[in-house]
Amino acid sequence: MKARVHVMLKAGVLDPQGEAVRHALGAMGFDGVEGVRQGKVIDLDLAEGTSEEAVREMCEKLLANTVIESYQIELTG
């Protein structure tokens, strides 16, 4: 069983890395990029029977800073 967790900064939270990427793309000649938000993807290999609730608890306690980040969980397999 696998889980993929997408972690992103919440709307309204300053994203300096995303802004640096947006600026760099513009400097490289890629016009039309009006905004960039960066996040992270965490892939977990889980024992069979691990519940989504357990993954949610992992996110709440370690994988995401829920004060400034939101997360989404995809369970596969």
Image (spheres, helix red, strand yellow):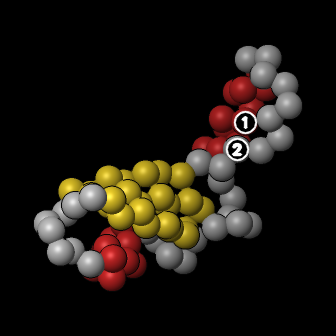
Marks 2,1: beta carbons within 8 A:
yes
Q: Residue 48's mark?
A: none
How crowded pointer 2 is (Cα within 10 Å; few <14, some 14-19, many 20+) is rated as: some
Which quadrant does the N terminus fall into?
bottom left
Task: Out of 76 and 25, give the one closest to the viewer.
Answer: 76
Residue 29 higher or lower than 42, as above or below: above
- From the viewer's perspective, tell me whether residue 42 is left or right of residue 37: left
Q: Residue furthest left?
A: 47
Q: Secondary structure at mark 1?
A: helix
Residue 25 higher or lower than 38, as above or below: above
Task: Out of 74 and 40, give the one closest to the viewer.
Answer: 74
How crowded pointer 1 is (Cα within 10 Å; few <14, some 14-19, many 20+) is rated as: many
- From the viewer's perspective, tell me whether residue 10 is left or right of residue 66: right
- From the viewer's perspective, tell me whether residue 26 is left or right of residue 50: right
Tell me, yes or no, if residue 61 can be seen here. Answer: no
Residue 31 pos. (x, y %): 84, 25
Alpha-carbon span between mark 2 and mark 1: 6 Å
Q: Amino acid at mark 1?
A: Arg
Q: Earlier in the sequence, mark 2 or mark 1?
A: 1
Residue 67 higher or lower than 36, as above or below: below
Residue at image location 47% in from the left, 58% down from the top: 6
* Residue to which mark 1 is pinned: 22
Q: Amino acid at mark 2?
A: Val
* Residue to which mark 2 is pinned: 36
Residue 43 pos. (x, y %): 32, 53
Residue at image location 49% in from the left, 67% down from the top: 72
Tell me, yes or no, if residue 66 can be seen here. Answer: yes
Residue 9 pos. (x, y %): 59, 62
Which quadrant does the C terminus fall into?
bottom left
Residue 14 found in image quarter: bottom right
Residue 67 pos. (x, y %): 54, 77
